Image (cartoon, coloured by chain):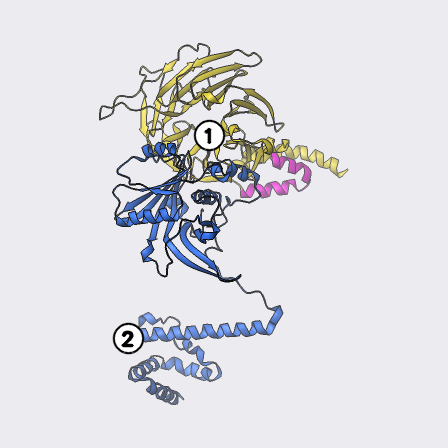
Amino acid sequence: MTANSQICSIWLGSETGILKGVRLIKKQAFNFCEMSCLSRDQEVCVMAWGDPHESEVLVGSVNGAVKTFSTDKGIFTGSRECGDPSQGRFTGLAVNESALITCVESGLLKVWKEGSTDTVEVNVGNGICRMRQNPSQRRHVATGGKENTLKVWDLERPDKPVFTAKNVAHDWLDMRVPVWVRDIGFIPDSDKIVTCTGHNQVRVYDPSASQRRPVMEAKCGEFPLTALSLPASQGTVVVGNTHGQLTILDLRKGLVRGCLKGLAGAVRGLQCHPSLPLVASCGLDRFLRVHSLEDHSLQHKVYLKSRLNCVLLSSRELESSSLDVTGDVEEVKGEEDEVWDTMETVTEKTKKRTTQSEEAAVSGVEGKKKRKVAKK
Amino acid sequence: MDVTELSTSESVSKKKGKTKKIKRKTKSDEGPVEEIKPADDEVKEEKSESGGFFPPTFSVSEIKNKQRRHAMFLKLKQEKRKLKLELKKKRKKEREALGDKAPPKEVPKTIENQRIYDETTVNPEDEEVAFDEGTDEFSAYFNRLTNPKVLITTSDRPRGRTVRFCEQLATVIPHAHVYYRRGLALKRVIPQCVSRGFTYLIVINEDRKVPNGLILCHLPDGPTAHFKVSSVRLRKEMKRRGKDPTEHVPEVILNNFSTRLGHTIGRLFAALFPHDPHFIGRQVATFHNQRDFIFFRFHRYIFKNEKRVGIQELGPRFTVKLRSLQKGTFDSKFGEYEWVHKRHEMDSSRRKFHI
């Protein structure tokens, strides 16, 4: 169990309440739950990393409990009651300096401090669909929902939002444009915020600019957009809609850069890898798909038997985990190390060749020492 | 040698008729050079190798005269058929000669044999899938907490064929009520149905006086399936049919729903009918899935003795193909889809099926 949880690079939450860990290279999926006490009210709504080292996963379920799962130990280490089902499902979960921030659909944003029972409560309005934390300024939190425009809150001063977005002007029939913010993303290295709406619009807001209306607006497809993610390379955004169409949009002009194909069901969770050009998507068709952002091809597809709600990528992925495996193998094998290394480097890409040859050089030295020991 | 050969062939062909004689002559005219060489061989070899008379680049399509070309083609086919039969006989003799040691008979390849294995195929012992199915939207029906009650309607202003189809469907499905659509919006119909205790809403879509679509919506909050309907046969168009179906609850047969999506659709169809079939009525409704098409048939059966059954087809028959499965009640614009048929991505292989 512990070994399984340590090698998983992608974590998913399903509608049946099961936390799934996936090891992409071997296409293995592991369920971390107790099969005897499964129930639908443990359905996972939100997931977040518990700490910056990504050793803990926080899982929020429909019944209001937030469970902590340790990736090193492979078990659920704790559970907290953070609200009750009458206020709606969790729409956001974040961690700020050992304090837990939760937001539910009715608009109650609570900051739960570790150890003490008093909480800071903010009412952000009704009908919230998403709450996200700014990864660079962790006190800032953005919320948005149905008929609830984007608001950015500072948790130190929770009485008034730092930035409230204004609805766009009336359309060509002079009618009010409805508001339905489905997902929010913070653009790194700047103040800007990207949102995707249920009326298939993607909007960029800039709090530091003089206008409260969106700086850029783009229409994307004919179906509601449900999830959004910002890749490591700047200037683009990946959005998914209820028909399973993943589109990559350019943020400067709002034009479509490309589509990622393969999904058959609505996209519920979308996340781009922090450093590699990969995006993981999960949805109602019970598959986890990892696409490459460069050539828009499907890299991995794993069948997980329940409908999936959220996905969480760890920063270490694919390459580093495969290197750990080869490191162990080299120590065991002995003199054939060099032969095996050369064989691998011929068949793989140049990127991996340089990193693997470095690793081989480092571990080769250690391996030689161990070989001498083994011979004796 | 050459002359005698020609004369013998001519004498044979005289019996057949004038046209054939001319053709025989042309054939011999065309291949006189080649005939010299294989003439010697022909005595030793079998007659069936007359195909070797022609150079390898010759094809029947090079003859410009249509009648001669047609005759040549027929001859070619006859020879091929002869070869095939002889090969078959030879193989059968070898098989009999070997007796028990004969290799097992080869199974012919069909599209169903060659189907690409779908990784979502349900394993009956899988706990997670069993839990998922046990707690999904149909669990109320399968735990015997509700009885089905079906509302059948059409798209606006239906024509005669669709109306008759709806009426016949209502006789086949027990507790079914047909209502006229009269331009009502489905999103407003659904809450009213729920309040009156309906469990299913069927909407038959019509195009050019013929039913071509079916929306099946499970009511409290269940999935909505949108199907394409084809080859609808009403009762009076069916040959050798029996009398009209009675009020007895029919049995339900679901064939070949193997993948996870197939399971969901199978349960969708099963929940249309009440739980306990009346075996006295001897009626059965079959939903047979083959290559992603679902065929609906309604029969009455009778056991003649323990081994033989007679069946009589009653009732309408139609074919249905799934286009999309949406989570939640009917909301085509803002609803979330569990499965959408995308032709260019999913129909690229002729051996891959999803249900």
The residue located at (66%, 42%) in the rendering is A336
On screen, residue B294 above or below A211:
below
Quadrant of the image for the N terminus of chain A?
Answer: top right
Q: Which mark is residue B149?
A: none
Name the residue at the right extreme. Answer: A376
State the residue at coordinates (60%, 40%).
A341
How far apart are the two marked residues, 2 and 1, measured between alpha carbons? 70 Å
Residue B32 rendering spot, x and y as whole percentages: 36, 82
Q: Main secondary structure of the magenta part?
A: helix
Q: Residue furthest left?
A: A173
Determine whether the residue tagged by mark 1 lies in a helix, strand or loop: strand
Q: Secondary structure at mark 2?
A: helix
Does residue B75 belong to the magenta stretch?
no
Q: Which residues are magenta?
A: A324-347
Crowd class of label 1 (few under 14; some 14 to 19; many from 20; radius 10 Å) = many
Q: Amino acid at mark 1?
A: Gln
Q: What residue is shown with label 1?
A: A271
Q: Is residue A281 above or below residue A346?
A: above
Give the residue at mark 2. Answer: B67
Location of residue A369 with respect to B274 vertically, above or below: above
Is A346 magenta? The answer is: yes
Q: The chain shown in blue is which?
A: B
- Considering the image in quadrants, where does the C terminus of chain A appear? top right
Q: Amino acid at mark 2?
A: Gln
**Left or right position of A14 against A267:** right
Give the letter of the chain under mark 1: A
Query: Mark 2 packing: few (<14 Cα in 10 Å), some, or many (20+)?
Result: few
Image colour assigned to chain A: yellow
Say left or right for A351 vs B196. right
